[in-house]
Amino acid sequence: MQMKRSGRIHYIEAGFSGPACSVQGFTTRHEGVSRAPYNSLNLGTNTLDQPHNIEGNRSLLARAFGITQDALVTVKQVHGSDILVINEPNEDFSHFLGLEGDAIITNQPGVMIGVCVADCTPILLLDPEKRVIAAIHAGWQGTAAKLAAKTVAGMQTMFGSDPRKLQAFIGPSIGKCCYEVDTPVRQAFIQNGVPWETCAESSGDGTWRLDLAAANRDLLIGAGLSSTRIQSSDMCVCCHYELFFSYRRDSGETGRQMGFIMLKQ
C-alpha cells in the first residue's frame, strides 16, 4: 500500500500482485472542488453538497485515469446486500446510479466501479485469471449480512472465479479505536453467524469496540480466500482528519471518499 497521484487525484494504491490488469485504490479527501464541510474531493451523491461540486469531483477522478465520467459506475448504497453485476458492454452506465445496492461485480474492461464511504469498509476484489473485479461497501449492516462472502460467491457463480485465486484489499475505514457499537449490532452478527469474538472487544455497559476490517477479513477467508491474498489498510479514517472523511467524527456533515477498481482495456 502506498500513496500515489494520478492527475490531481491523490489516492492510496491497493497493491495487487501478478499481472497488471487493473488500476485500483482509495481516494483521499484532497484536490477536489467542494467547500467545507465537504472539502474537497467529495464523491458521494448522498450528501448535501452541491450537485455540481460532486459532478466536478467525479469528473476529476475519471479524467485522472483516462476515462469519461460515464464509465465511472456507482450505485445507490443502502446498507443492504444486493449486488449489481455488469457482464456485457453498455452504451450508457448512468442509469446504474439510481439502482440500490452495495456491491458491484464486472468483467468489463475500461469500466471503473466504485463504492463511496465515510467510515464503512471499502473492499476491492480481483480475479487476475478470469479478469473479474468487485467493489464492496460494508458497514456493520453489510458485514452482518455477509456481503463480502456473497460477492465472492457471485464472482464464482457468474464468472467461474476460484475463491482461492482471488485477491482482496480492505481499504481505510473506521477503526475499533473509534467505533463503539451496542447490543443490536452484536445480535445481528451472532444471528447471522458472523464471527464476533475475533473482531469485537467489550468496552463495558453493553457496548463493544468493533473492528470492521477484521470481521470482513474473516468473512473473506470463510468464503475461500487465502489469508495471504488479503491485504488490509491499518488507517482509521476517524483518526486521520487530514486524509479522510468520517461520518461519525464529523457528526454526519461530511463528504465521501471512494474505493475504486478498473480492468485495463
Image (cartoon, rainbow, N blue to C red):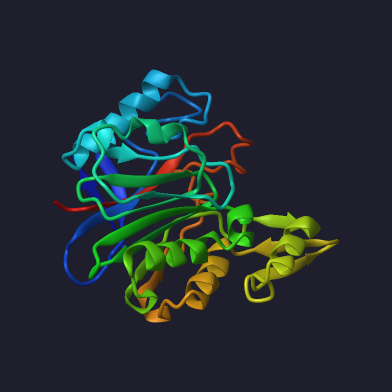
Residue 193: image location, x then y, percent: 67, 71
- Who's the residue at 53% across and 24% down the image? 48
Query: Residue 66's quadrant in the figure?
Result: top left
Among all residues in the image, which is located at the extreme left? 265
- Who's the residue at 59% across and 49% down the image? 80
| Above or below, 96 relative to 172 | above
Among all residues in the image, which is located at the extreme right? 205
| Above or below, 246 relative to 231 | above
- Who's the residue at 38% across and 22% down the image? 53
Q: Nearer the viewer, residue 170 or 235?
A: 170
Q: Is residue 42 visible?
A: no
Q: Is residue 68 visible?
A: yes
| Above or below, 180 relative to 77 | below
Query: Residue 32's quadrant in the figure?
Result: top left
- Who's the residue at 37% across and 46% down the image? 114
Residue 237: image location, x then y, percent: 50, 51
**Which quarter of the figure is the N terminus placed in?**
bottom left
